[in-house]
Amino acid sequence: MKRLRCVIMRGGTSKGVFFHENELPQDLRKRKEVILRVFGSPDKRQIDGLGGADILTSKVAIISPPSRKDADVDYIFGQVWIEEPEIYFGAICGNISAAVGPFAIDEGLVRAEEPVTNVRIFCRNINRFLTAEVEVRNGKAVYEGDFRIDGVPGTGSKISLDYSDSAGFITGHLLPTGKRLDVLEINGLGKIEASIIDAAAFAVFVRASDLGLKGSESPDDFDNDKSLLSILEEIRVTIAKQVNLREKSEIQPLVAIVQKPVSWTNFVSGDTIMAEEADILSKVYTPFGMHKAYPGTGSVVTGAAAKMEGTIVNGLLSQAQKMKDTLVIGHFSGVMPIEVAGREEEGTFKLEKAITYRTARRIMDGYVYI
């Protein structure tokens, strides 16, 4: 057996295995094989590895010293498929990204400066930057604090992530089709309106009412409705083909099902969340099933959509909500705020600010055996 040094970290509502890049093979084919073995994929339980048999816990982060002078650290994110021998490296995870700054500080890749260290992160697989603000003390990241995010028990130190450099993360264009509102022809559904936007994540927004949904549905309700999942996958694949993404090996775009808020049940706690606690209610579908909370990058693209006149998200907001600096997104596990700002310039929307707040925790470090 071989052993590899790694760290398991929670970032936001996700959990992942973090590696220094020099722990892994440089040959990309061998690297993929090693990571799949680490996670125990393909297997729906990932019983022979570190994967948690859920989209939120089957993630890998590969960290290295910066490859360019204007960065503090390089970051490669991989979504490890559970039941297929695949790893998707074509995007980043906003939740796992929250743990990159603390990891880099604790591992000595970035010099700690009290009380807050700014970590400029180069997302090497998509050639973009994000910046994390991390509280530090005595040369290490601080994890304890009083900041709370829904979907995670307890509280922690607040980490801010700036995604202002996120327009066109995946496709190269904020509006991949050139339109703010498209009409799709979907097998089993017919014509449906959609807003297709790329900012931190590539997402297609559809109205819950157009799918016959009320907003009170749980993740299990979605996952048990094979007809609905088939329609959502058809929407996803239709857009992936339209913008020339590979049909099977990509997890993009996300499909966000949006509506005006109604009261709903927190999937984690069982508590009732009142409609007035959120500006918009959104549920996200991926090829792995429904996201049980909300993607960090998903909050950015939702915020951008909210600020763009003519999109489905913008059309669901009141005038007062459109004017606010912070959009509060309701999701299966609670609510998630995103600070977002932009402006219209000659018919084009310019994203100027997109800041999310997360917490992270170092759970363990040691060796994984393969």
Image: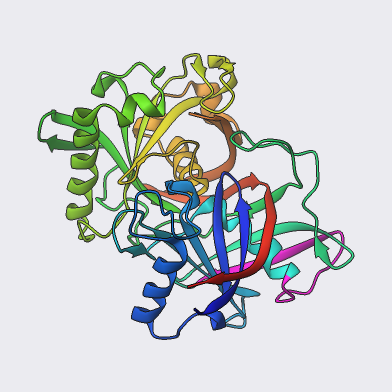
Q: Position of residue 320 (x, y in %)?
A: 55, 22
Q: Position of residue 359 (x, y in %)?
A: 68, 47
Task: Identify the residue at horizontal 48%, vertical 50% (top origin).
Answer: 52
Answer with left or right where residue 130 lies relative to residue 112: left
**Depth check, front residue: 28 or 308:** 28
Residue furthest to the bottom:
26
The colouring scheme, among rainbow, by chain, secondary structure or one colour, is rainbow
Q: Position of residue 13 (x, y in %)?
A: 57, 44
Task: Identify the residue at horizontal 46%, vertical 24% (top origin).
Answer: 317
Answer with left or right where residue 18 lies relative to residue 284: right
Answer with left or right where residue 369 lies relative to residue 176: right
Quarter location, residue 291: top left
Quarter location, residue 191: top left
Magenta residues, start to end: 107-123
Task: Identify the residue at horizontal 24%, vertical 23% (top origin).
Answer: 210
Residue furthest to the front:
1
**Depth check, front residue: 25 or 246:** 25
73 lies above or below 255: below
Q: How many marks?
A: 0
Residue furthest to the right:
138
* Residue 126 in view (yes/no): no
233 lies above or below 82: above
263 lies above or below 236: above
Q: Position of residue 364 (x, y in %)?
A: 68, 60
